[in-house]
């Protein structure tokens, strides 16, 4: 399983903790997904996927991932994000005299978080220390950014953004459990392509803003900024659905317990994405009033 997020690619679950039928080994990575014609799960190359009883046996093996594992690991990563965000908010002043320095430190933390995330994405196995470190640096960046936005742009918006992120998570989970959202191969390809286009536009906007010392293409203010932020929130919700699907498949197919760290890593990255987009939309709405 590869961490589910709008930037990094994905990989499926395979034989689980102790190896599969016809060959032992660790969960297979970067393997081609089994197609419907093979009776397999479209998101996993799994010898148990075609047999309900075999899937149940796989999930019940010692060392197999459970939903409790995913919940506990996600609580650790998200808790780390929250704690470091609060510490950064309190420790780094964002008054006019220190704003540049604090912004520089926050930008450095964001770069470190990005590098750690990329390192984990290319590792064959999850590294809990690396994932927790990513969450810590990401939280540090979010704490400074949120403090700046709340101080200079939209007071009180951070609480609203957190509540909005929770609402998106709960709504997406409900829609997924009710099967209003069906994660198919076509859905996955569409969401991935849309996210790549979104990221390219963000990068182009950043370049324009650096060279023009303004708002770039206008994605950070006004009606265009609101529309762009809403698209980002919708994309984040779609990636949450993909996260839920991978967690569901991992538990059903008896993925190794350590894979729950990758599930937590993916969920954390997606929720950070959604929070930033919600913060963007609410900040624009309040600043325009």
Image (cartoon, rainbow, N blue to C red):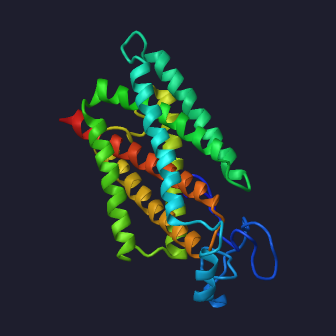
Residue at image position (58%, 59%) is 260
Which quadrant: the N terminus? bottom right
Q: Is residue 72 above or below residue 23?
A: above
Q: Is residue 97 left or right of residue 4?
A: left
Residue closest to the eye, 53 or 185: 53
Q: Is residue 225 above or below residue 178?
A: above
- Residue 154, horizontal then vertical, whole percent: 26, 31
Which quadrant: the C terminus? top left
- Residue 47, horizontal then vertical, whole percent: 70, 82
- Residue 245, horizontal then vertical, whole percent: 50, 69
Q: Is residue 15 above or below residue 197?
A: below
Residue 174 in view (yes/no):
yes
Residue closest to the eye, 7 or 266: 266
- Residue 244, horizontal then vertical, whole percent: 48, 66
Residue at image position (64%, 42%) is 129
Residue at image position (67%, 80%) is 34
Residue 197 in view (yes/no):
no
């Amino acid at each position: 399983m590869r961490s589910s997020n709008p930037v990094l690619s994905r990989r499926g679950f395979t034989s689980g903790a102790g190896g599969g039928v016809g060959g032992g080994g660790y969960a297979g990575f970067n393997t081609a997904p089994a197609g419907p014609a093979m009776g397999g799960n479209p998101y996993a190359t799994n010898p148990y996927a075609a047999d309900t009883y075999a899937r149940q046996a796989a999930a019940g093996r010692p060392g197999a991932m459970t939903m409790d594992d995913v919940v506990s690991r996600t609580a650790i990563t998200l808790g780390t994000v929250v704690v470091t965000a609060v510490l950064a908010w309190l420790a780094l002043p964002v008054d006019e005299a220190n704003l540049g320095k604090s912004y520089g430190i926050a930008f450095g933390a964001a770069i470190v978080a990005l590098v750690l995330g990329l390192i984990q994405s290319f590792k064959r196995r999850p590294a809990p220390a690396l994932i927790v470190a990513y969450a810590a640096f990401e939280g540090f960046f979010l704490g400074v950014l949120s403090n700046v936005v709340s101080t200079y742009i939209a007071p009180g918006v951070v609480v609203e953004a957190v509540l909005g992120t929770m609402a998106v998570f709960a709504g997406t989970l409900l829609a997924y459990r009710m099967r209003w959202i069906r994660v198919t191969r076509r859905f996955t390809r569409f969401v991935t392509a849309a996210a790549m286009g979104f990221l390219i536009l963000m990068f182009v906007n950043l370049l324009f803003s650096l060279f023009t010392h303004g708002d770039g293409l206008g994605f950070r203010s006004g009606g265009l900024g609101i529309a762009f932020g809403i698209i980002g929130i919708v994309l984040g919700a779609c990636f949450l659905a993909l996260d839920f699907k991978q967690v569901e498949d991992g538990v059903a197919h008896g993925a190794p317990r350590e894979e729950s760290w990758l599930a937590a890593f993916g969920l954390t990255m997606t929720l950070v994405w959604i929070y930033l987009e919600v913060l963007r939309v609410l900040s624009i709405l309040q600043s325009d009033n």
